[in-house]
Image (cartoon, grey):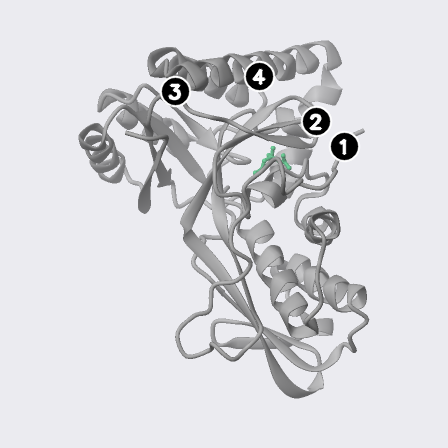
């Protein structure tokens, strides 16, 4: 069984509860950001450790408006009654109704407007970030406090719709400020011994986390001995990666990233575009590169030792077909 406790504020620096977009300063608002996983995705679902990297500049914002009639949810210029949401909005619908229930607010005369700057189905935590933003906007509308354990559980109720069996890493990472190690449901800060530049590149191939997690489950169930060994190997690579990052050993960390990619491919979550971007990143001098998130498409992450190398890697991945590229620096220079 997967343990899904709260993300204790005392052990993990959390983001500010709300960022008010221009022109809406008077409205109840919530926001959260994207995330990447450095090593350990999929294994995290089975209780093995994984390392998460918040991507704070990529944000989703939600606002609560008065709107007479049934409860509505809007995204961009599209607005739906919450009872008639397209399937792709099912999880944010759950976040909305669960948060209103939690605060004993009536499910009417409101519209929750969501504006996402995070590409969907790209492995960057768009569903968890939207759920967090909505929960916080409704909390602000209720003008009531919300403890971290209840906040986490509200987001997880939406993530169960999006993912089936979420480990909880996305729910933690989309509000965390710093990289952390997530082990058996518990997040712990990860101090870095040296700065690292991570280049995240979007293959443009959209893939469902739910289906990827279910696919890995089928692979593991088909041959439990082999499946468990592959997941345990990912766990070992993550533990080694933690030691590398703490000690500033980027070369061995990068080798572990690339080794993790081989295992993820064996688990069935690779894709030709992922391979293409990894080849480009390694060819441009990346210390390591792998998919990030659920795979089968989505994003690739590569590690670089300095900003100049990160720029070269980003250009190489763009030339190789990436539709968007972001660089995140962590640690102090
Ligand atoms: C998705 O970002 C990470 C997965 O390991 C699923 C999870 O841990 O919930 C694939």
Of labels 1 and 3, the one closer to you = 3
Tell me residue 196's x, y (percent): 33, 27
Residue drawn at (53%, 43%) of the image: 176
Sequence-wise first label, 4 or 1 = 1
What residue did someone put label 2 on? Answer: 184
Structural distance between the alpha carbons of marks 4 and 3: 22 Å
Return the x and y of residue 140 as percentages of the image width and height.
63, 69
What secondary structure is found at the residue carrying circle 4? Answer: helix
SS type, badge 2: loop
Separation of disc 1 and disc 3 at Cα? 29 Å
Q: Earlier in the sequence, mark 4 or mark 2?
A: 2
> What residue does disc 4 label?
234
Residue 63: percent from the left, percent from the top?
A: 55, 72
Q: CA distance from mark 4 to mark 1?
A: 18 Å
Which mark is nearer the camera, 3 or 2? Answer: 3
Query: Which residue is the site of mark 3?
Result: 193
Label 1 Cα crowd, 10 Å radius (few <14 / some 14-19 / many 20+): some
CA distance for labels 1 and 2: 6 Å
Mark 3 within 8 Å of ligand 1, using the beta carbon: no
Q: Give the vertical position of 31 relative to 281 (above or below).
A: below
Distance between the alpha carbons at the discs numbered 3 and 2: 24 Å
Quadrant for the C terminus in the image = top left
Q: Which residue, given by chain and number where applicable, does mark 1 sit on? A: 3
Between the residue at mark 4 and the residue at mark 2, the CA separation in whole angstroms equals: 14 Å
In the image, residue 116 sits, relative to residue 73, either above or below, namely: above
Please tell me whether residue 169 is drawn above or below residue 65 in the rendered image. Answer: above
Q: Nearer the viewer, residue 205 or 304?
A: 304
């Amino acid at each position: 069984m997967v343990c899904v406790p709260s993300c204790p504020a005392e052990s993990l620096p959390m983001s500010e509860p709300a960022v008010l977009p221009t022109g809406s300063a008077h409205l109840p608002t919530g926001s959260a950001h994207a995330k990447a996983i450095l090593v350990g995705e999929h294994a995290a679902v089975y209780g093995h450790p994984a390392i998460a990297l918040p991507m704070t500049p990529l944000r989703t914002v939600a606002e609560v408006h008065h709107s007479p009639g049934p409860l509505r949810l809007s995204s961009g210029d599209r607005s739906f009654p919450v009872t008639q949401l397209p399937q792709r909005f099912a999880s944010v619908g759950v976040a909305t109704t669960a948060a209103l229930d939690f605060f004993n607010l009536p499910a009417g005369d409101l519209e929750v407007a969501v504006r996402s700057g995070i590409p969907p189905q790209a492995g960057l935590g768009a569903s968890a970030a939207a759920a967090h933003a909505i929960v916080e906007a409704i909390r602000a509308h209720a003008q009531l406090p919300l403890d971290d354990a209840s906040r986490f559980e509200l987001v997880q109720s939406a993530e169960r719709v999006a993912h089936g069996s979420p480990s909880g890493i996305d729910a933690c990472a989309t509000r965390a400020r710093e990289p952390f190690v997530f082990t058996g449901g518990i997040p712990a800060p990860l101090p870095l011994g040296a700065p690292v530049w991570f280049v995240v590149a979007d293959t443009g191939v959209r893939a469902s986390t739910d289906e990827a997690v279910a696919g890995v489950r089928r692979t593991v169930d088909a041959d439990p001995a082999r499946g468990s060994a592959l997941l345990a190997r990912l766990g070992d690579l993550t533990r080694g990666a933690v030691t590398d990052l703490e000690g500033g050993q980027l070369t061995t960390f990068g080798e572990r990233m690339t080794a993790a990619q081989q295992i993820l491919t064996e688990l069935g979550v690779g894709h030709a575009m992922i391979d293409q971007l990894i080849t480009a990143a390694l060819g441009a001098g990346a210390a390591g590169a792998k998919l990030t998130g659920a795979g089968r498409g989505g994003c690739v992450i590569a590690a670089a030792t300095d900003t100049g190398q990160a720029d070269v890697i980003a250009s190489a991945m763009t030339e190789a077909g990436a539709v968007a590229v972001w660089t995140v620096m962590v640690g102090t220079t």
